[in-house]
Image: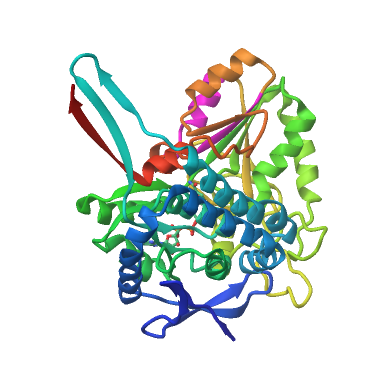
Amino acid sequence: MEKLQNFINGEYCDPTKGKYIDNYEPATGKVYSLIPNSDEEDVRLAVEAAEKAFPIWSKMSIEERSKILVKLSEGIEARMDEFVQAESKDNGKPLSLAANVDIPRAVSNFHFFATAILHFASESHNMEGVGINYTVRKPIGIVGCISPWNLPLYLFSWKIAPALAAGNCIVAKPSEVTPYTAYLLGKVAQEAGMPSGVMNILHGEGRSVGDAIVKHPKIKAISFTGGTQTGENIARTAAPMFKKLSLELGGKNPNIIFADCDFKEMLSTTLQSSFANQGQICLCGSRIFVERSIYNKFKEAFVKRVATTVVSNPKDPAAKMGAVVSKSHMEKVLSYVELAKEEGGTVLTGGVQVNLEAPYDGGYYLRPTVIEGLAFDCRTNQEEIFGPVVTITPFDTEEDVLMMANSTQYGLSATLWTSDLKRAHRIADQLQAGIVWINAWLVRDLRTPFGGVKASGVGREGGWEALRFFTEPKNIFIKY
Ligand code: NAD
């Protein structure tokens, strides 16, 4: 069976203690490779390599650094098929999604930050007749990047690209549930001529290697994307060490639909925003609020489309949805369907596992699920499920829907459907969310700030925000 390796100091290597964990293929439920279960000893080696590489990488001209990162992006593009196949196999997502979204976006992430750094500037503040302040922004040093399983290379590269572009060396850890494309990245970095020790990739469980990254005193900043509870644990460890922290956490996003929306466009986008990537995108709108006058029309049309959505193996070109990421995740999602029933909800469609024929009979397939009749403040409507389950709830007034939309501990994103411009501005302004889409969903411009409020996180990624996070400003004053 294939054994994945860590990538330290420009070379692939085995974990020092020789421990491995199973890597499952969600489409079949079978183990298909082994992942190093690294620990603090591997982190120590990676930090040592990063420390040696830092003077070389941080002092390299920005143009040269940029060229290497552009090559990295081109290297992924040149191996597009290999990356697409690997991402789909590792995660269970349809091949078409990996080919159209995940891997192209990873290419763009590297290209975007490779070129953004060429234009990154800092400020000066003149004090007339007194002197001038100028601010320099320097790389932090060694930074830790930890990412989740839902959009594996997409989110991994979203962190490591700006960290590297800003001149830092990294010790990075992809999710142990989906490690494969991050594993492939080592080869691409070697081919791109990235100096040894700049990019170190360690595999393994959060509680072993993830925790060791967060605790290492020479790792000065942590950029984390994952669950809110994990973010809280990380913050608890990192805060007393005064580490810079960027936390992109969970969500329970509202999708608000007014009667005056473009119904057709809303309906097809709502299918996407509910079930893309099996509902496992932090930006999916899992609570759908519909103005009462079109509630029944929406319910009928939506349920009809959801009920005919093709759930199939990720290689099937007809598949609109593939497998969810793991057995335990599937069980968690199903347990929420049971909870919803206990809380008085009615399952309008879905709520069950899908059994495919061999070799996919052991895979983790779920029917997309729509539930109605729940109170806005019940657990099903308050807790993150992170799977193909949405609830639909009618509303009467703007005040009502805003209260319900803002009622959770989360505040990542929101979607709003209306053709009334004034209302769109009014509601967008009052939604407690870091990102609001009006008459659209998941349209992303990499220059914009990305992140959430409340329990959805601290800090912003994207554009200058990311480059500011991964640099330390120093203000220097000189007297006239
Ligand atoms: P998770 O928190 O379980 O794991 C995320 C990463 O953290 C993994 O690499 C894991 O190994 C690591 N980890 C776990 N415990 C750790 C510890 N104690 N110390 C250090 N690292 C540790 O999350 P997940 O299940 O992989 O991903 C799903 C979650 O991610 C959902 O809550 C989802 O909303 C969130 N998410 C958020 C965003 C965003 O941008 N806000 C994007 C995608 C996913």
Image quadrant containing the C terminus: top left
Instruction: Between residue 416 and residue 107, name the one nearer to us.
Output: 107
Residue 72: tell me if it is visible: yes
Residue 233 in the image: state x and y as whole percent.
Answer: 32, 56
Q: Give the magenta part as a residue range.
A: 397-417
- Compared with 114, 15 (above or below) is below
Residue 211: tell me if it is visible: no
- Compared with 2, 176 (above or below) is above
Q: Is residue 403 left or right of residue 363?
A: left
Q: Is residue 297 left or right of residue 250?
A: right
Residue 449 in the image: state x and y as whole percent.
Answer: 48, 36
- Compared with 448, 337 (above or below) is below
Instruction: Between residue 428 and residue 104, name the one nearer to us.
Output: 104
Picture residue at 59% right of the left edge, 74% below the top: 24
- Residue 78: in magenta span: no
Image quadrant containing the N terminus: bottom right
Residue 336 in the image: state x and y as whole percent.
Answer: 55, 54
Q: Is the image coloured rainbow, by chain, by secondary structure, or in one colour? A: rainbow
